[in-house]
Image (cartoon, helix red, strand yellow):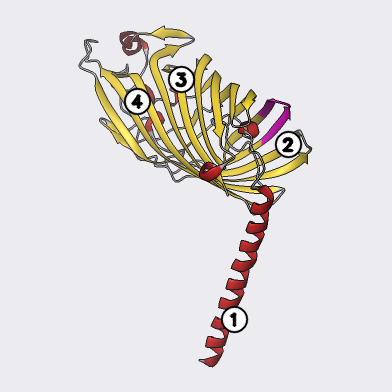
């Protein structure tokens, strides 16, 4: 008993000493930085993630709200009316031989919570999770190809979890380059149900697969102008439990910003994004709807974004960042028949300590 008590006392003493050492280090760091100016353009537009690193011992918490709207169907670059979709789109798991349920609109809302910690000046670790809600409006056609009243279906819940490491490759006063290495964990459901059995692939909340997330990010600045570029990929490492996976996807971004004052900057961003098609098939998704066919998955989209970053260097709001970005599609191509992306809004908050 005495030995256990002695060990417990020793461990408690070491723990308290560690806390004091950490507190002293943070206090010293705070003293050095308390009068420094924080620049709004020190971060990329809020829609870009994994764009910046932190100093040793620094933490950051981030929240983003994203809302994406899709409306109207397209095929081969042409707009299609719901009736045109219903009378020309095959249902390979029939009967019936043609799709009967045609989507007309889809809204996706996502709450994202992220954490970053830098164990050293050259490595920053990141963890991100999300909560999604997807709402799809569809029109059902009877066997005479007459439309019935529109209906809605929702799916909601936790999305996939992402763990990442940002590793510095080059650092100079005005130029920075780092690698993005990550893994997506299948915490999002792929068992969501709709009105006709299991919901289509686009209404599921996750991929069901472990995905490798490689990437690289560059940022630079000169005076009141900052710029950057990022290229990332998503590579599924396995088939999920329903025997399918997404093809490789990528996300390439270029951006530039102008800083009006230290606390305020505005940005432009050009994004080219590929969402991989579904390889394989979930046998539980067989309803006569557009989203049940893997041939109607996979797209390429070019988007243009306008954003604002705001940060304070003084008082109780020191270090608190607020940001907004509006992204709209300027060009897109899809496989098969799919809804057309309209735009996406992102609001964000970040705080480093």
- Contact flag, marks 3 and 2 (Cβ < 8 Å): no
For disc 3, the marked residue is 343
The quadrant in which residue 22 appears is bottom right
- The CA distance from mark 1 to mark 4 is 68 Å
Crowding near pointer 1: few (<14 within 10 Å), some, many (20+)? few
User: Residue 15's spot in the image, x, y percent?
Assistant: 58, 72
In front here: 109 or 207? 109
For disc 2, the marked residue is 177
- The CA distance from mark 1 to mark 2 is 44 Å
The quadrant in which residue 222 appears is top right
For disc 4, the marked residue is 93
User: Residue 2's spot in the image, x, y percent?
Assistant: 53, 92
The magenta stretch is 216-229
For disc 1, the marked residue is 10
Q: Residue at x 22, y 10 (%)?
A: 146
| Res. 302 visible in picture | no
Crowding near pointer 2: few (<14 within 10 Å), some, many (20+)? many
Earlier sequence position, callout 3 versus callout 1: 1
- Indicate the secondary structure of the residue bearing disc 1: helix
- Indicate the secondary structure of the residue bearing disc 2: strand
Earlier sequence position, callout 3 versus callout 2: 2
In front here: 178 or 19? 19
Up-down relation of residue 71 to residue 185 (above or below): above
Horizontally, residue 214 falls left or right of residue 318, namely right
């Amino acid at each position: 008993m005495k030995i256990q008590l002695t060990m417990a006392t020793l461990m408690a003493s070491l723990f308290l000493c560690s806390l004091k050492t950490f507190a002293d280090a943070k206090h010293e760091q705070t003293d050095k930085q308390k009068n420094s100016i924080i620049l709004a353009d020190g971060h990329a537009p809020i829609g870009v993630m994994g764009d910046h690193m932190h100093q040793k011992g620094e933490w950051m918490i981030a929240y983003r709200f994203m809302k994406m709207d899709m409306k109207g169907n397209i095929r081969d670059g042409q707009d299609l009316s719901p009736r045109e979709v219903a009378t020309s789109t095959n249902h390979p798991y029939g009967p019936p031989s043609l799709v009967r349920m045609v989507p007309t609109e889809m809204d996706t809302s996502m709450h994202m919570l992220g954490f970053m910690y830098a164990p050293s000046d050259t490595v920053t670790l990141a963890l991100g999770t999300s909560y999604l809600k997807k709402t799809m409006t569809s029109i059902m056609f009877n066997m005479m190809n007459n439309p019935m009243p529109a209906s809605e279906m929702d799916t909601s819940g936790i999305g996939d979890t992402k763990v990442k490491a940002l590793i510095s490759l080059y650092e100079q006063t005005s130029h920075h380059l780092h690698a993005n290495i990550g893994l997506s964990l299948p915490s999002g459901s792929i068992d969501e149900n709709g009105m006709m059995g299991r919901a289509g692939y686009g209404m599921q909340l996750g991929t069901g697969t472990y995905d490798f997330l490689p990437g690289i990010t560059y940022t630079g600045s000169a005076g009141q102008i900052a710029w950057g570029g990022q290229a990332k990929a998503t590579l599924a490492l396995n088939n999920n439990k329903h025997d399918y996976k997404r093809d490789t996807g990528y996300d390439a971004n270029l951006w530039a910003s102008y800083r009006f004052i230290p606390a305020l900057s505005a940005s432009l961003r050009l994004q080219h994004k590929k969402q991989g098609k579904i390889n394989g098939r979930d046998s539980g998704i067989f309803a006569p709807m557009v989203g049940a066919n893997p041939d109607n998955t996979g797209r390429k989209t070019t988007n243009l974004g306008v954003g604002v970053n705001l940060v304070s260097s003084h008082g109780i709001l020191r270090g608190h960042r607020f940001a907004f970005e509006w992204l709209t599609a300027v060009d897109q191509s899809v496989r098969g028949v799919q809804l057309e992306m309209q735009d996406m809004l992102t609001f964000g908050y970040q705080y480093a300590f």
